[in-house]
Amino acid sequence: MNNLKIMFIAAGLFLSAVADCLYPEEYNLEKYLSSVEQNNRDLQIARKNADAAGETVRQAFAALIPSVGVSGGYTRNLKDVKEPTAVYAYDAGLSGIYPLHYEDVDSNYDNELQVALGVSQSLYDPAAAANYEQAKKNRDIQQTAEDYTRQSLLTAAKKLYAQVQLLDAIVTVRKETAETSEAVYLSIEKKYNAGTATELDLRMAEVDWKNDISAEAEAEKNAALGLMALKTLAGLPQNCDMSLNEKTETVPALPQENNMSEVLAARTDYRITLLSKDMADLIYKSSLTGFLPTVTGSFTLAYGQYGGYEGKDDWDAYDYTAAQLGIKIALPLFTGGYRPSKVKEAEIGRETARLQIQKKKDEIEQDLVSAQLRMKESSRKIESARALADASLRASSLARIAFENGLGTQLAVSQANTNTAQAKLNLQNAIYEYRTAYYDWESASGKVP
């Protein structure tokens, strides 16, 4: 019965999973980006790195607060330890000399109990304080890096989403072209059977049709691969189908010129560069602490109790209480040139961090200009491609009509169909280029939500 229940449960889970995949789930861009934020593995790792950085702050802070410890122990001596001990002196008749009489005496207690409490506090430790400041700065860097990873992934997700939509559009164009080629072939076949078309026209139409079928198959393969990558990025199951319903007929308007100071304030990677410079300054300050002393204070309170001496049953035959207060000062005098070398290394790190800031500014400005130029170029391409697509579609229709009326050639029909397909592809590619350029501009200007 238990096995039967397990089988029913497994079958129910399987049918539930299959039912969830019976129909493709529709994803607009917003819904897809939400899935990326929730399920992407790289983003989850970035969050864990930020959490780990928070723990290092707690660990560094622990070196600045008192350390308290307690210890205790009990010993039961199962065997008495006998030691020769002078018990008394006796008169041996040796003219005033009184030798000592020794006997074996129990020298240990049956029960020994010790309890101790110790407190240690760093009174002055510049290295520990510097480590704490570095840990806090590293936490800020990791948290900003998490945000940067999120923004980068969202930008990549937008571009991949647009790419898959382009691949789907290519499939549609290739399918329409194959259907048109098939219709042309069937029309020429009828004319050939009626004796009004040559075999050359028939074979050329057949070649066009077969080539278009192969192009459609390749487009479908590319679209399937793109969809797999899209699902992987968002952590979605590969066995379930999905459809993309984001509208692509209209594209965002060309943005205005950016204020560079606002862009720098919004860019997370630039913020990381600034935080890295702060970290380099802290490392430099930390390198100077190698020339400073450390001062540590301690306090110990101990209690001990002994009992059961010489076979007696008394537990508290002897006890004691001890208290100690100490202070320790340590100052390194010579380390073989290690400390000056660390200072020099930290100075080099500060200068490198300053140069990285300048380099990052140049990169951001270049990214902005590049994205804006690409958007302007793609915008002109879209206008031209739309006009060309309309004209090509009209030319293809006229070529087919002329051929059917005996006023044109099959070559003209084939060329018109090819031009129409290419014009449609050019339009979809121009839209894709504009969208990717716009997403790059959003990333470059720090406007990724």
Image (tube, grey):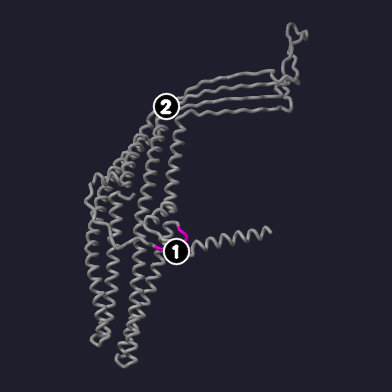
Q: Which residue is mark 2?
A: 124
Q: Tell me the tag on residue 24.
A: 1
The quadrant in which residue 160 appears is bottom left
Magenta stretch, main secondary structure, is loop
x and y percent of residue 201 in the render? 30, 87
Q: Residue at x 44, y 27 (%)?
A: 330
Answer left or right for 335 relative to 440.
right
Q: Residue at x 67, y 21 (%)?
A: 306
Q: Which callout, 2 or 1, points to the residue nearer the camera?
A: 1
Which amino acid does the dot numbered 2 rest on? Answer: Tyr
Which amino acid does the dot numbered 1 rest on? Answer: Pro
Residue 104 seen: no
x and y percent of residue 26 in the render? 41, 61
Q: Is residue 184 above or below residue 231?
A: below
Magenta residue span: 236-243
Return the disc, 2 or 1, that comes first in the chain's sequence.
1
x and y percent of residue 34 in the render? 40, 53
Mark 2 and 1 residues: CB-CB less than 8 Å, in contact? no
